[in-house]
Image: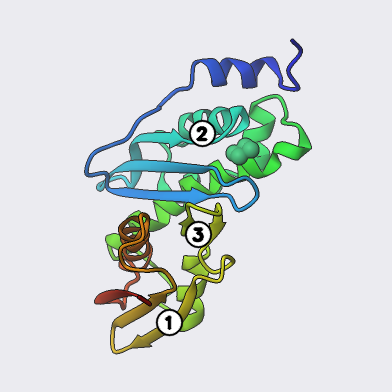
Amino acid sequence: MKFPYSETVMEHFRHPRNVGRIENADGKATEGSPACGDMVSVYINVDESSNKISDVKFESYGCASNIATGSIITEMAKGKTLDDAKKITWRQASDALGGLPPIKAHCSVLAVEGLRSAIQNYEERHGLVKEKKPTTVETIRQRLRRVMDPLTGLGLVRAKLVTDIEVKDGTVRVVVDLPSDHQFASAIKHEVIEKIEPLWDVEEVLVDFTE
Ligand code: FES
């Protein structure tokens, strides 16, 4: 069978580097793609004295392109400073893989965003965010775009499951239109908190369900 992938993509797909998770990672993020419903998680450890990525791992629930991109960008990121690793683009990843079919661009974007978000998560958790903008309802809405509804594979906002967001004195309250005993309620709650809590001016995150 002929695959639409380069030899390099197939090689990384068959033998992906840096697969797995890092327990108690210094930074981590999960990104989901509304286009296909797949997800990728990226974990990083950072050497504080040099600000370099000392270890990086990923877990993919995506396709061959996603796995190959996760493999190549983790290789590219290891040993780089956070600032340099942030600059890795999906174009560079795709070039390093000998090209990806255009229809698969979102899969490699997803992996690259996973890495960037893991770095952002590290910076937020370590007080390294340079631009300290106050958190607004719009900030929260943007973060929630990245929380997936496992049933539809859409972001929570796009699936119209977020019915209210309040931001007041360091407390963020998010109302999700699901019963609290829904099979995915606790997973969604956990993810919402994980995405919002690292914001520099947020002290408490409350997730309420409508029933
Ligand atoms: Fe979903 Fe590639 S089709 S990650």
Q: Nearer the viewer, residue 18 or 133?
A: 18
For the residue marked with disc 2, what is the amino acid?
Answer: Gly
* Residue at 25 percent of width and 47 percent of height: 49
* Residue at 71 percent of width and 19 percent of height: 6
Of label 1 and label 3, which has the lower sequence position? Answer: 3
Residue 32 sits above or below residue 194 on the image: above
- Camera-side mark, 2 or 1: 1
Of label 2 and label 1, which has the lower sequence position? Answer: 2
Q: Are marks 2 and 3 in contact (CB under 8 Å)?
A: no
Residue 102 sits above or below residue 151 on the image: above
Residue at the disc numbered 2? 70
Q: Is residue 24 left or right of residue 80?
A: left
Q: Is residue 98 left or right of residue 43?
A: right
Residue at the disc numbered 1? 165
Q: CA distance from mark 1 to mark 3?
A: 15 Å
- Camera-side mark, 2 or 3: 3
Q: Quadrant of the N terminus?
A: top right
Query: Judging from the image, what secondary structure is the residue with disc 1 in?
Result: strand
Q: Residue furthest left?
A: 24
**What number is the disc on residue 146?**
3
| Relative image position of residue 27 (x, y in whole percent) | 32, 49
For the residue marked with disc 1, what is the amino acid?
Answer: Ile
